[in-house]
Image (cartoon, rainbow, N blue to C red):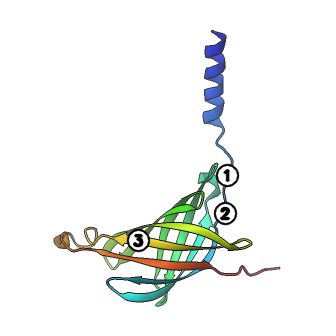
Amino acid sequence: MIIVTINFLWTINTLAAPKKFTGTDYSGVYSCKGSNVKIGNYELIANFVINKPNSRGNIGSYDLIIETENSTTYSGQAIANGNNMAITIEIIDGSNQAYSTGVANLKKFKPKRFSYIHHYYESNQAINRSEINDTGNYGSENCVMKKSKVTR
């Protein structure tokens, strides 16, 4: 009976107290050069901000804003487990909506600065149901964290 009570109390304490985030914080502004099969070469800026209430242990949750070279912005989210990250971006073009889903592997190249290559896929199914057999779009981006500006 004592063992059952101890196990029950340990389970309640484990569920009640989420683990503090101990992973690497990849928050920052990244300059990216990319290419995909539909538009060719492009540049964009990706801004990652850690969502601390939803990050725990080695798992970091991020909100992000993407700004393209023609000043179009998209929002998204990412989740990192160690140096591996899954990224989802919502693409809204007028009344059409689609999602870009990708994976990235982050690497430190200077103290507190990271880079990554993001491989992604965008389905046309969400944009235009009549084009279900369309191949969609895929590509990759090489992104490097910009130096942070010191504000006083």
Residue ID at (46%, 83%): 34
* The quarter of the displayed image where residue 114 is located: bottom right
- Residue type for callout 2: Asp
Residue 11, position in %: x, y?
61, 28
Residue assigned mark 2: 25
- Residue type for callout 3: Tyr
Is 74 drawn above or below residue 49 in the view shown?
below
Secondary element type, mark 3: strand
* Marks 2 and 3, the one that precedes in the sequence: 2
Count residues near mark 2 (Cα–Cα under 10 Å), then give few for <14, some for 14-19, many for 20+: many
Mark drawn on residue 120: 3
Outermost residue on the right side: it is 152
The span from disc 2 to disc 1 (Cα, nearest Å) is 9 Å
Residue assigned mark 1: 21
Residue ID at (54%, 61%): 84
Residue 22, position in %: x, y?
69, 52
Residue 93, position in %: x, y?
35, 79
Q: Is residue 24 left or right of residue 95?
A: right
* The quarter of the displayed image where residue 29 is located: bottom right
* Label 2 with label 1: CB-CB less than 8 Å: yes
Residue 133, position in %: x, y?
18, 70
Is 29 drawn above or below residue 2 in the view shown?
below
Q: Is residue 85 left or right of residue 88?
A: right
Considering depth in this image, is 35 or 9 the residue closer to the camera?
35
